[in-house]
Image (spheres, rainbow, N blue to C red):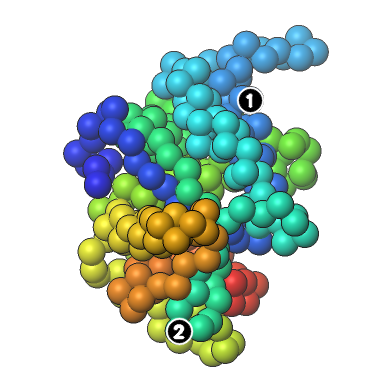
Amino acid sequence: MTTIDQPQPDETVRILIPDHPDLYRRLGRAVDFAGALRHANDDVEDGDEPWRLPDQLVAPELQQALDVAFLHKPLMWHVGDDSDEARTETALSHAGVGHMGVYITSLTCGQLQLLTAAAALLTQAETTPFKERTPLLAEIAAFVDAWREADADNASEASLAAWQTAVALLAIAAAAQSATEHRPDRLLDHEGRLVPVAEPAGPGPAADTALLLERIDAAAAAAAADGEGQAREVELDYAGFRAFRRLSVEWHVAIYGAKADSSDALLQSLTY
């Protein structure tokens, strides 16, 4: 599995997206923001000056990458929708206990790197102290501030926060290191008990993604051999479940960020 640290741009990265209720409609809002970002420099209304963002942020390839991950795979619009009878996620279980299902999408390493680099630039601009910002970082920071206000007011279907969440989720599949920032100490298990989360030390999210995909592929191959069609339910062995458990922590941090250990976020960890 290729990592972002050693990219081979044309290599395909298969990515797991959790069927998490707090992702319902957020991926759609992320796709909408990708379009808004693409046209930020030429989107002028009521005589306002256009933004002057760098080419890195308005490149069509950046929007296309998110379109490939989500928009061109319409089944991804079902993520988190418990009312959808046409759901096609892969259900996961272990020792007879059902856990959160997953969807599978893919990008090239080059596309994934474009997204993560753009997300890092937005974060750099926002977190750089005001007096230390270059004119370019100041422009990007002003753009971010405007979208933070729009997110706070729900003033747009597009959402910067949703876009950042989507990119963070996609990046997990190629991450060599586990998340450490905002990582909670405990999450709820299927019986509602707070239990220690999987240790960040280990094979890493990319390896865990590969292992879980291997289990899903094996179940699909077995189902096909038995003439059962596509495997919609996968019973994980212990190693597969441990990989899922570690990945669930990565997803939790990506979805909730600085609020990952809040009471509401911990309650949602029952989903896993």
The numbered mark, 1 or 2, whose residue comes first in the sequence reads 1
Element marked by disc 2: loop
- Give the label on residue 36, or none: 1
The residue sitting at 45% across, 61% down in the picture is 226
* Viewer-proximal residue among 251 and 235: 235
Q: Residues within 10 Å of mark 1 (few under 14, many from 20)?
A: some
CA gap between label 1 and label 2 equals: 45 Å
Nearer the observer, 230 or 39:
230
Amino acid marked by disc 1:
Ala
Q: Residue furthest left?
A: 6
* Quarter of the figure with residue 225: bottom left
Confirm whether residue 74 shows in the render.
yes
**In this rendering, position of residue 135 left or right of residue 2:** right
Residue 201 on image: x %, y %? 24, 69
Which residue does the image show at 23% across and 64% down from the upper left? Answer: 203
Nearer the viewer's eye, disc 1 or disc 2? 2
**Drawn side of residue 41 relative to residue 239, left or right:** right
Which residue lies under the disc numbered 2? 95
Name above or below for residue 266 compared with residue 120: below
Q: Amino acid at mark 2?
A: Ala
Q: Is residue 74 above or below residue 16?
A: above
Residue at 36%, 60% (x, y): give it: 218
Helix, strand, or loop for circle 1? helix
- Residue 157 screen position, x and y as percent: 74, 37
* Residue shown at the point (61%, 17%) measured from the top left: 39
Residue 4's disc number: none
Relative horizontal placement of residue 155, taking residue 249 as reference (left or right): right
Q: Is 82 on the left-hand or right-hand side of 143?
A: right
